[in-house]
Image (tube, rainbow, N blue to C red):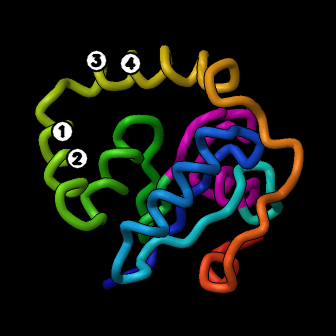
Amino acid sequence: MERALVLYDGECGFCTRSVLFVFRNDPGGRYHFAALGSPTGQRLLREHGIPPTEDTIVLIDGPRASVRSTAALRIGRGLRWPWSWVAALGFLLPRALRDAAYRAFARRRHRWWGREDHCANPSPELRARMRG
């Protein structure tokens, strides 16, 4: 299985917890991670024509880049059951509706989950899957 890179908001409490969730539910170790603001993240955003100020989750999977709800659901499809099944069901909703819900949540995520003002101390296994 080919590796994929998840770009996430490194200052968002929810996003950081989401990385840990994906890490724990990714039995094949397919997903690697980089913060959107990291040199790797900024370079990949430019390479894929995504505005560097885009404040969303991004999945780089081979030559394809996905954002917002599509990225989240594609990541979910690669996780262990039941998350892969839940993500597959999510694709039944129209993208416009999914992205509207995603944006509404994203606007409130810092208020609900807070901001990370320090780097988490990842396990050696997770650290090996981080790209900077």
Percent x, y of residue 6 = 54, 59
Q: Residue furthest right?
A: 118
SS at circle 1: loop
Q: Would you say the residues marked 3 and 4 are in contact, meaning their CB atoms lie under 8 Å apart?
A: yes
Which amino acid, mark 2? Ala
Question: Which residue carries the number 2 mark?
Answer: 87
Mark 1 or 2: in front is 2
CA–CA distance in space, label 2 to label 4: 15 Å
Percent x, y of residue 53 = 74, 34
The vertical placement of 9 against 4, above or below, is above
Question: Which residue carries the number 4 mark?
Answer: 101
Q: Quadrant of residue 130?
A: bottom right
CA–CA distance in space, label 4 to label 1: 13 Å
Q: Quadrant of residue 84?
A: bottom left
CA–CA distance in space, label 1 to label 2: 7 Å
Residue drawn at (25%, 67%) of the image: 80
Position of residue 4 in the picture relative to residue 46 (left or right): left
**Magenta span includes 50:** yes
SS at circle 3: helix
- The N terminus - image quarter: bottom left
Position of residue 34 in the picture relative to residue 85 (left or right): right
Question: Which residue carries the number 3 mark?
Answer: 97
Q: Would you say the residues marked 4 and 1 are in contact, meaning their CB atoms lie under 8 Å apart?
A: no
Label 2 environment density (alpha carbons within 10 Å; few <14, some 14–19, many ≥20): many
Question: Which residue carries the number 1 mark?
Answer: 91
Q: Which residues fall within the magenta stretch?
A: 41-58
Residue drawn at (18%, 56%) of the image: 82
Percent x, y of residue 114 = 72, 29
